[in-house]
Image (spheres, rainbow, N blue to C red):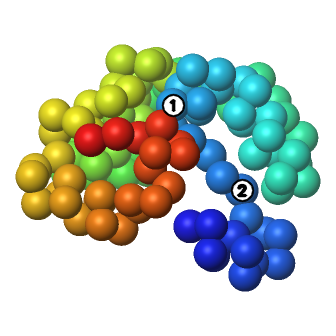
Amino acid sequence: MSEFKRQSTGNFHTLRYEDLVSKPEEEINKICGFLGVGYEPEMLQFSRNKDKLTEAYSPQLMEGIHKSLLNNIGTDKIGTWKTELTKTEKGIRGYKYGRNQKRKKYFL
């Protein structure tokens, strides 16, 4: 990722999942600043719009990949990759991100 960052023209923002769920308001503020849009507290109240989400996505998507959109932001999922990735996925992840994972505090 650092190679991509070096080659980019500044249109690059790094966000760690752990930071987002631990300090959501601070991180969303940073994202808004990067995008040049104003932060609004309602941005963190997305789970209050369950009706709109269920209208926008099919039931299959809501039960699958978008199921967590209905949950509040929380730290309970930090580190689940350690137990949920298969051995092969961990190997691919280690090969692909090996140099950066120690610096970013992602250990297998």
For the residue pair 73 and 47, the one nearer the viewer reads as 73
For the residue pair 107 and 81, the one nearer the viewer reads as 107
For the residue pair 35 and 49, the one nearer the viewer reads as 35
For the residues marked 2 and 1, what is the alpha-carbon distance in whole angstroms? 15 Å
SS of the residue at dot 1?
helix
Residue 37 visible in this rendered orientation of the protein: yes
Q: Position of residue 9 (x, y in %)?
A: 82, 78
Q: Position of residue 17 (x, y in %)?
A: 51, 38
Amino acid, disc 1? Glu
Left or right, 55 with reference to 13: left
**In which quarter of the view is residue 46 placed?**
top right
Left or right, 30 with reference to 52: right
- Disc 1 target residue: 18
Whether residues under marks 2 and 1 lie with C-beta atoms below 8 angstroms apart, the answer is no
For the residue pair 101 and 13, the one nearer the viewer reads as 101
Q: Tell me if residue 12 comes above or below residue 40 in the rendering.
A: below
Q: Residue at x 89, y 41 (%)?
A: 38
Between discs 2 and 1, the one toward the N terminus? 2
Left or right, 52 with reference to 5: left
Q: What is the crowding at mark 1: few (fewer than 14 residues within 10 Å), some, or many (at least 20)?
A: some
Residue 76 disc label = none
**Quadrant into which the C terminus falls:** top left
Q: Position of residue 28 (x, y in %)?
A: 72, 35
Q: Residue at x 53, y 43 (%)?
A: 104
**Quadrant into which the N terminus falls:** bottom right
- Disc 2 target residue: 13
Q: Residue at x 62, y 67 (%)?
A: 2
